[in-house]
Amino acid sequence: GRRRVRQFDLVTDWFAARRNTLLSQFYSSDAAGRANMLREARPGGSVTPEVNEFLECASKQGRFKWFENCTVQNAVEQNDEIVLTCETSQHAGGEDTCEPFDLQADYCIVATGSVLNVNEAPILGNLVKESGTPVQNGFPVLTDDLRLCDGADIFVLGRYASLAIV
């Protein structure tokens, strides 16, 4: 998608006067409602104003190039360079088009806004499947004490525990 310049990768309503209202809504929602609120609150894909200013300067000097609306299909390191296989999405004349290309770079800064999905996490995803832990919109539905499931001594922290804690 397009570059977003923001100080935080979290909608600022969660820091403002509406914080208590949003927290109340969050804690009174079921897992599906909480997952939707989390997705809306953390849209991702942003850079801070300071980083944006630095990169804009480097771009004007020809040392950096922005690639927006770009999906990296593959990335490998070859001879101290990063080789990216990319695909750009464009909307022209009422049609969506994709243009694949290869890019060689010394550095790669990724502002992906990646989507969290426990089912795609190599180790935790397998544990979730084996334990039968329900998943809502990519987030595992944990017990109140952050266990993967009742009776398991597997505790989950960080973004994967977002449905249970803020």
Image: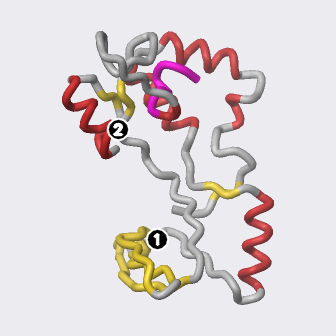
Question: How many marks do you count on the picture?
Answer: 2
Q: Does the magenta portion include 165? A: yes
Q: Which residue is drawn at the image coordinates 31% and 16% (left, top)?
A: 152
Q: Nearer the viewer, mark 2 or mark 1?
A: 2
Element type at mark 2: helix
**Which range of residues does the magenta coloring cover?**
160-166
Q: Does 18 appear above or below 85?
A: above
Q: Does 35 appear above or below 11?
A: above
Callout 2 amino acid: Val
Where residue 148 appears, as percent x and y from the top left, is 34, 21
Q: Which residue is drawn at the image coordinates 52% and 52% (left, top)?
A: 113
Where residue 64 appears, as percent x and y from the top left, is 66, 81
- Which residue was labeled with disc 2? 118
Q: Is residue 125 left or right of residue 2?
A: left
Q: Main secondary structure of the magenta part?
A: loop
Q: Does 65 appear above or below 55?
A: below
Callout 1 amino acid: Cys
Single out the residue that lies furthest toward the front: 153
Q: Is residue 45 left or right of residue 18?
A: left
Quadrant in which the C terminus appears: top right
- Which residue was labeled with disc 1? 70
Q: Which residue is drawn at the image coordinates 37% and 81% (left, top)?
A: 99
